[in-house]
Amino acid sequence: DVLVSNHPQLAGGSHLPDITVITPVFYKGEIIFFVASRGHHADIGGIAPGSMPPHSSKLEEEGAMIVAFKLVRNGVFQEEGITEVLKAPGTIPGSSGTRNLR
């Protein structure tokens, strides 16, 4: 399984647009370590495009918050699930989900 997270208070992220993917590395069928890859994303939803809008008063207004999500489960990419996570900010009044997801 592969995990994804970005939450700065609960999952060690720096801010919401920095999304971290955590992947196990196997040797002879055993996990020997994990690799973490972090990328900055231009827009993950929220009250304004970009990151950390100056007029936000709550973290949820800054975009999608991911404590831990299985991006790959049993070898299968969870495209529908991650799409839902990235569009979730759109359920908050005055916010939208990620604007760049196609």
Image (spheres, helix red, strand yellow):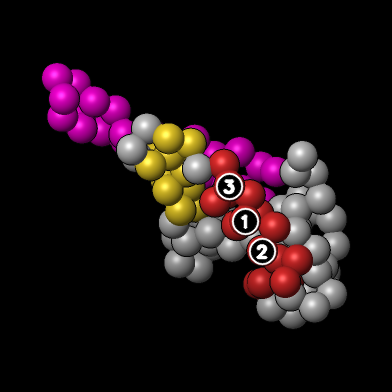
Task: Name the residue beneath numbered marker 1.
Answer: 84
Location of residue 65 (image quadrant): bottom right
Identified by mark 3, the residue type is Glu
Residue 37 lies in the magenta stretch: yes
Task: Name the residue beneath numbered marker 2.
Answer: 88
How crowded pointer 1 is (Cα within 10 Å; few <14, some 14-19, many 20+) is rated as: few
Residue 87, position as x, y percentages in the image: 70, 57
Task: Name the residue beneath numbered marker 3.
Answer: 80
How crowded pointer 2 is (Cα within 10 Å; few <14, some 14-19, many 20+) is rated as: many
Vertical side of 39 occupied by 44: above or below? below
**SS category of the residue bearing label 1:** helix
| Disc 1 and disc 3 in contact, CB within 8 angstroms | yes
Range covered by the magenta-colored residues: 15-42
Residue 4, position as x, y percentages in the image: 48, 47
| Disc 2 and disc 1 in contact, CB within 8 angstroms | yes
**SS category of the residue bearing label 2:** helix
Identified by mark 1, the residue type is Glu
In front: label 2 or label 3: 3
**Residue 81 makes an appearance in the image:** yes
In space, the residues marked 2 and 1 are separated at their CA atoms by: 6 Å
Q: Residue 31, which numbered label?
A: none
How many numbered marks, from 0 up?
3
Q: Quadrant of the N terminus?
A: top left
Location of residue 15 (image quadrant): bottom right
Residue 46 lies in the magenta stretch: no
**Residue 53 makes an appearance in the image:** no
- Residue at position x 20%, y 32% in the image: 31
**SS category of the residue bearing label 3:** helix
